[in-house]
Amino acid sequence: MNKKKLEIEYPLSSKSESIVWGLIGNAHGLSKWMADYVEEVDGVMTFTWGEVWTQQDIRTSVIIERRENSFIRLKWDVNPSDDDFWELRVGKSDFSGKLTLLITDHVDEDDYDYMKGVWADNLNRLHNVSGL
């Protein structure tokens, strides 16, 4: 199936890279807004949606690269191509000094609109839990 690059730039209300990094660069932060549970073991993050007593969706993603206060790049274990990564990056405007969260994902063309909605929901949860 053909992949399409999905890029989202989300403005943040924080000027602190370390605050943003705490929410995107580790399992604890990601579990606050991206999935119900996130666990990291030996460079692999396991994302769980749903409660133990209900049906769960569990996916694993390998950390390809991580630079503190800058970005984390991961690859879902089901993607055969090294080009099929997803990334959360902290950007900063030279003009205003304001931070942005830059999201890059590679999604199936047929799922593009759906995944855009999933990321919008995730960003809404990020805002609700952190005020960013």
Image: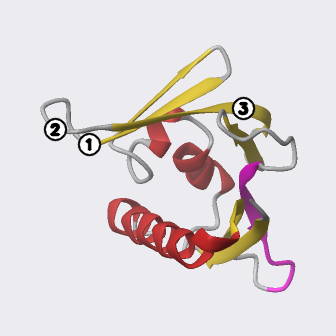
Vertical comparison of 14 with 52: above or below: below
Quadrant of the rendered image containing residue 45: top right
Give the Cα separation between the discs numbered 2 and 3. Answer: 28 Å
Q: How many marks?
A: 3
Return the x and y of residue 1 as percentages of the image width and height.
74, 59
Q: Nearer the viewer, residue 129 or 18?
A: 129
Question: Is residue 99 visible in the rendered structure shown here?
Answer: no
Check disc 3 and report its element: helix, strand or loop.
strand
Q: What's the residue at 40%, 72% (across, down)?
A: 124
Q: Residue furthest top?
A: 42
User: Left of 94 or right of it: where is 76?
Assistant: left
Name the residue tied to disc 3: 63
Give the Cα separation between the discs numbered 1 and 3. Answer: 23 Å
The range drawn in magenta is 85-95
Residue 70's tag is none
Residue 50's tag is 1
Q: Nearer the viewer, residue 94 or 84?
A: 84
Vertical comparison of 94 with 70: above or below: below
**First-in-chain label (2 vs 3):** 2
Q: What's the residue at 51%, 33% (across, down)?
A: 27
Q: Residue furthest bottom?
A: 95
User: Left of 117 or right of it: where is 79?
Assistant: right
Name the residue tied to disc 2: 54
